[in-house]
Image: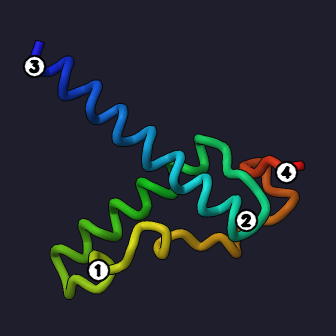
Amino acid sequence: MKNDKISMRVSADLAWEIALMQEHVQRTTGFRLTKTATVEALIERGLEVMKAEEGDGEAADRAPSEGVDTATFGEEDENLETMH
């Protein structure tokens, strides 16, 4: 039972992070990332933080949204949905 509660909490936290990142990208670029692209970006950010914790800590000091390079996503990118 305890594991179910932990799983639900992790799922809720991940859903929240996905929503925040999608909102940030939409606000800054006018495009909306698909959930798959958002999860991939969150995983990359998590890896940056893990590496920073082992190294100098610079990446860990940045906000999660600063770890996303929104300039690499173009209109032709299949991971984007144009917002009208």
Q: How far apart are marks 2 and 1 (CA)?
A: 24 Å
Circle nearer the N terminus (2, 3): 3
Tell me which numbered mark, 1 or 3, is placed earlier along the sequence: 3
Q: Which class describes the residues within 10 Å of circle 4: few (<14), some (14-19), or many (20+)?
A: few
Check residue 2 in the rendering and tell me which mark sits there, or answer none: 3
Q: Where is residue 66 shown, x and y percent of the image?
A: 48, 75
> x, y (%) of residue 77?
79, 56
Q: How far apart are marks 1 and 3 (CA)?
A: 32 Å
Kindly identify the amino acid type of the residue bearing the numbered disc 3. Lys
Q: Nearer the viewer, residue 44 or 31?
A: 31
Q: Give amino acid for label 1.
A: Asp
Sequence-wise first label, 4 or 2: 2
Decide: marks 4, 2 in contact (CB < 8 A)? no
66 vs 20: above or below: below
Disc 2 secondary structure class: loop
Which badge, 1 or 4, comes first in the chain's sequence?
Answer: 1
Measured along the vertical axis of the image, is residue 68 above or below residue 81?
below
Indicate whether 76 appears above or below 14. Answer: below
Badge 3 element: helix
User: Residue at coordinates 83% horizontally, 50% vertically from top-left?
Assistant: 83
Q: Tell me the SS state at disc 4.
A: strand
Instruction: Mark 1: give few (<14), some (14-19) or many (20+) Cα within 10 Å.
Output: few
Residue type marked 4 = Thr
Q: Nearer the viewer, mark 2 or mark 3?
A: 3
In the visual, does 30 lie left or right of 2?
right
Tell which tag, 2 or 1, sits nearer the viewer. Answer: 1
Q: Residue 61 carries which label?
A: 1
